[in-house]
Each structure stands twice: as structure tokens, then as C-alpha cells.
């Protein structure tokens, strides 16, 4: 049985790492090598970790540190999590962006109770340039 508190804490930590724009190596161990990564602005010719690396390189080129992710409406089952994220960031060109995003994760539970994400998708619900 999945410990929902462990999964919730993992999600909070995941986005704290994104707020700092930690190196990609801090994320890959939590993603299955063949993860189905479905995010805006991805290279669909790439798969798994290669797709994630490519997407994240674009993030690092586009955004300044730190970013802000505020997680809410978390719903966790034994193998999935759905939640909303309010995202704010400043681009390298100085613009402020804000978006409300619905995230859907599917995962396997590892022996330590933490998820190994097998599917990661984000759907933009609302986007604004502030």
C-alpha cells in the first residue's frame, strides 16, 4: 500500500528542487529511464531521459533562479498523483510569467516508499505574462 504522506512530501521536495533549478542529475534518479514525459515544448523525437534532459536544458536557458511552484489540490492513489501547480518565474529576458498547471503522474513505489515516476504530464490550465 502506498504511503500518501511519503508521496506528498516527495512532490513538495520535487518542486523545491525545480524552484532552485537544480541540475538535471538531481531529477533523473526519480524518473524511470523510459519515462513518458509529456510537457509543453518537448522534442517528440526523443524518449525517456533524453527527452527530459532536452526539455530541462530549455528550461535552464529560459528561466532565472529561483522559480516558484505552489502545489495544491493533491490527489494520490496507490500508483498515481494528480495536482495543480501555480508556477511563477522570471525569464532570462526579464519577463515574469505565471501559469496554473494540472500535473498527472503515474509511478511505481520503490522499496523506500518513494515514487519512481513512469509517466509525467502537465496540462496548462491558465497562462499569463505579468
Image (cartoon, rainbow, N blue to C red):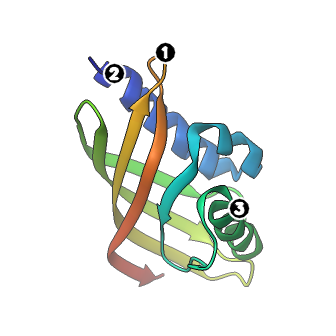
Location of residue 5 by image quarter = top left
At a point 52% along the width and 53% down the height, the residue shown is 35
Instruction: Look at the image and tell me whether residue 27 can be seen.
Output: no
Classify 88 as above or below 104.
below
Instruction: Look at the image and tell me whether residue 53 can be seen.
Output: yes
Residue 85, position as x, y percentages in the image: 38, 56
Q: Residue 69 vs residue 25: left or right?
A: left
User: Of 11 and 95, which appears nearest the observer?
Assistant: 11
In which quadrant of the rendered image does the N terminus lie?
top left
Residue 87, position as x, y percentages in the image: 46, 62
Residue 69, position as x, y percentages in the image: 48, 53
Q: Earlier in the sequence, mark 3 or mark 1?
A: 3
Of labels 2 and 1, the one closer to you? 1
Q: Which residue is mark 3?
A: 53
Q: Which residue is mark 1?
A: 111
Q: Earlier in the sequence, mark 2 or mark 3?
A: 2
Q: Mark 2 and mark 3: span between their CA atoms?
A: 28 Å
Residue 95, position as x, y percentages in the image: 62, 83
Classify 9 as above or below 11.
above
For disc 2, the neighbor class at 10 Å (few under 14, some 14 to 19, many from 20) is few
Q: Which mark is residue 5?
A: 2
Classify 103 as above or below 51.
above
Q: Which mark is residue 89?
A: none
User: Of 32 and 42, which appears nearest the observer?
Assistant: 32
Amino acid at each position: 500500500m502506498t504511503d500518501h504522506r511519503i508521496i506528498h512530501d516527495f512532490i513538495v521536495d520535487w518542486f523545491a528542487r525545480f524552484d532552485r533549478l537544480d541540475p538535471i542529475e538531481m531529477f533523473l534518479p526519480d524518473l524511470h529511464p523510459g519515462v513518458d514525459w509529456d510537457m509543453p515544448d518537448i522534442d517528440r523525437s526523443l524518449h525517456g531521459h533524453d527527452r527530459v534532459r532536452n526539455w530541462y536544458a530549455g528550461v535552464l536557458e529560459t528561466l532565472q533562479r529561483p522559480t516558484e511552484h505552489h502545489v495544491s489540490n493533491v490527489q494520490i492513489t496507490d500508483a498515481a498523483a494528480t495536482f495543480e501547480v501555480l508556477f511563477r518565474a522570471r525569464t532570462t529576458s526579464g519577463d515574469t510569467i505565471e501559469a496554473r498547471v494540472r500535473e498527472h503522474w503515474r509511478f511505481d513505489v520503490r522499496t523506500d516508499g518513494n515514487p519512481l515516476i513512469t509517466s509525467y504530464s502537465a496540462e496548462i490550465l491558465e497562462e499569463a505574462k505579468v
